[in-house]
Amino acid sequence: MKRYDSVFHLPTKVIMGDNCIFEHRSLLKELGDKALIVTGKRSAKANGSYRDLVKALEANGQAYCLYDQVMSNPTVDCVFEAAALARQERCDWVIAIGGGSPMDAAKAAAALAVQPVPQASLFSSVFSQALPIVAVPTTAGTGAEVTPNAVLTNDAAQTKTSVAAPVLVPRLAFLDARYMQGLPQSITINTAIDALSHGIEGLLSVRASPWSDVLAKASIGAIADCFPALEGAAAEWNQSQVRQKLLWAATLGGMVIAHTGTIAVHAMGYMLTYFKDIDHGRANGLLLGRYLQLVQAKERAEDPPRIPELLLAMHIPNVETFTGILDRLLGKRERCNATELAYYADRAITAKNSANGLIPVTREELLEVFSTSLG
Amino acid sequence: MKRYDSVFHLPTKVIMGDNCIFEHRSLLKELGDKALIVTGKRSAKANGSYRDLVKALEANGQAYCLYDQVMSNPTVDCVFEAAALARQERCDWVIAIGGGSPMDAAKAAAALAVQPVPQASLFSSVFSQALPIVAVPTTAGTGAEVTPNAVLTNDAAQTKTSVAAPVLVPRLAFLDARYMQGLPQSITINTAIDALSHGIEGLLSVRASPWSDVLAKASIGAIADCFPALEGAAAEWNQSQVRQKLLWAATLGGMVIAHTGTIAVHAMGYMLTYFKDIDHGRANGLLLGRYLQLVQAKERAEDPPRIPELLLAMHIPNVETFTGILDRLLGKRERCNATELAYYADRAITAKNSANGLIPVTREELLEVFSTSLG
């Protein structure tokens, strides 16, 4: 029973609930004297998270400064700029507020602030120290609030690449679903599918363990519970119970990939994001149904029954029904030509994630998934 | 949705698998220079765990000394003796090997070694520091390898009382099911029922959260999977897959009560252990079926549906069927007279755990559970 051979570790203390930053503000006191707050340009100020955080810091008498220039799919330049500000302002801890992009940028900046490396060697560096990190997700998708990864745009390699180190796992994560109130349906769906993809890829990872399976099935099941609301009217997908459930599920999904990593779906999705600027969660969703059909066709009798477990967790009878749900959630698909898709398949098969699946896949199979999904 | 208001934190790094101590021995290096190993008199030497640990420490060049005098239901004298040895030998970390008793004793000793308090005020002390703790469970029951609790015999209060502090959560837990090979059926069953009780009491706790529910249902489900093997021949309950599954489930159960605490079942069980010397897990098991019947009778329409979720997790149709399984696993019941049971009910209703249940219970109801279980 090799599956029981595993390491399970969830160091992040996760606080969940309305107004949880202010109510649990005492936890922030021990983290440092002056915080670098890292956000995108607008949303943290619009959704109330920045205001709540500042209120908590001021009640604690803790100083802070703000870096609010993180863009979608953050660049290496951006994280070096944030790290330089942390050093210049003598910040001794970092607070990330935002979706995946500000959280990823903040995590990388927290490492670079204390362990500067040349910009060209960022992705080959091993980070053994970082400023303490607190994460406040404002979308329910990435799970970066509990993972050791910071995914950044890697122009040299023409993809998104993950900087990963145990020191990048946030000390604290505050999950307040009020910050997601009013996010548009498309972002709600795309981020939910990103989270769903984490659970599904975790189940299908060669590093899946009994621990990660428990978290993955719980996450997948909770997101599947929300499918009808996500397809419905704003009164459904924007209700607070749905927001809370999706946020909880997204953090569970982060806990999964913190243990299992992602697989070929993410490797393929990064191509669509890098070259076609398709949102990360949507990119995974466009590929997920066809990828599962491939896995189902290839599952051998001696493999653990992953597709049946996945379908059971979602209470969905078969992969085709699931693909149909994804099709409805995603709407009209982007299209790519055969040359593009062949290039993406060439690239995706060489990614580390593609070797991380329980069922081995070939370049031709990835091309088939690309073609049936986007061709 | 108040249920989402919660804090989730699992600081212990859990390593699972055959020979995991030696394979992951590098993790021990950073914990200290000289370890105090705390065990019972015999089992750690008999089941191979002590030998494996010493082999790992010697390969690392780390010094150690041994305290091997922990008895079942450890006394306050015993933990003070272990703490004195730690100070005398200048140990800077503690390794617990054993069932619940050595782990509980080791955890309390780790605190007392650096924060001495008068013996009479042990149970009223707040521990803010302790030597780093590593736990190696050799039964699959208590979950103490991941909890902040050290449960000790409290003669002044005539019960077992928990010393609890975040610093008592072990840094590392090594789960190697080989150490359980050859444990007799009675211990295997009693410890499995202890673990089961943790999951069930966690589901029924007023502090249950979506996080703890996920872990509780996984733990309960895995133990229920093992019911047929536990009732069967040694070739069934002693097979390594069953041992591994029970050990994993017991650690999940510990993760549950680390968040939810236990409820009246434990408060009542402590009476049977203190006054009748009935094994802790068995004591809980004797009470569990009738307690669930009580909860089922009292569940109100406005409460979350806990008994149905519990039965679903176990794939068991109703509480009566579950009680029948417990009856078969436990065999002939101990009996107590009415005077004894009235006294136990008087005592149990005043315990903190009894106020921790989602469904409030009265002294008369606890007496009814005692009487139908043991009268």
Image (spheres, coloured by chain):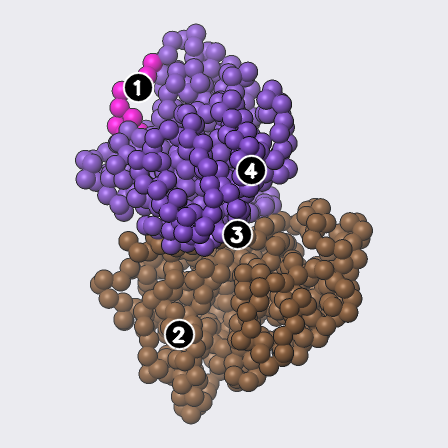
Chain colours: A purple, B brown
Do dots 1 and 2 share one subunit? no
Report the amino acid beneath label 1.
Arg
Q: Which residue is mark 4?
A: A90
Structural crowding at the residue carrying mark 3, measured as other residues with C-alpha within 10 Å and reported as few (<14), some (14–19) or many (≥20): few
Residue B139 pos. (x, y %):
60, 63
For discs 4 and 2, the disc positioned in front in the rendered view = 4
Pick out the residue farthest to the top: A339
Q: Which residues are magenta?
A: A324-335
Question: Relative to B215, is B153 on the left or the right?
Answer: right
Q: Is residue B166 above or below residue A134?
A: below
**For the residues carrying marks 2 and 3, which lies nearer the camera in this image?**
3
**Mark 4 belongs to which subunit?**
A
- Residue under label 1, please give it: A333
Are discs 3 and 1 located on one and the same chain? yes
Residue that mark 3 sits on: A30
Identified at 32% across, 50% down, the residue is A18
Q: In this orientation, which residue lies closer to the viewer: A253 or B341?
A: A253
| Distance from the alpha carbon under mark 1 to that under mark 4 | 47 Å
* Residue highlighted by disc 2: B354
Q: Secondary structure at mark 1?
A: loop
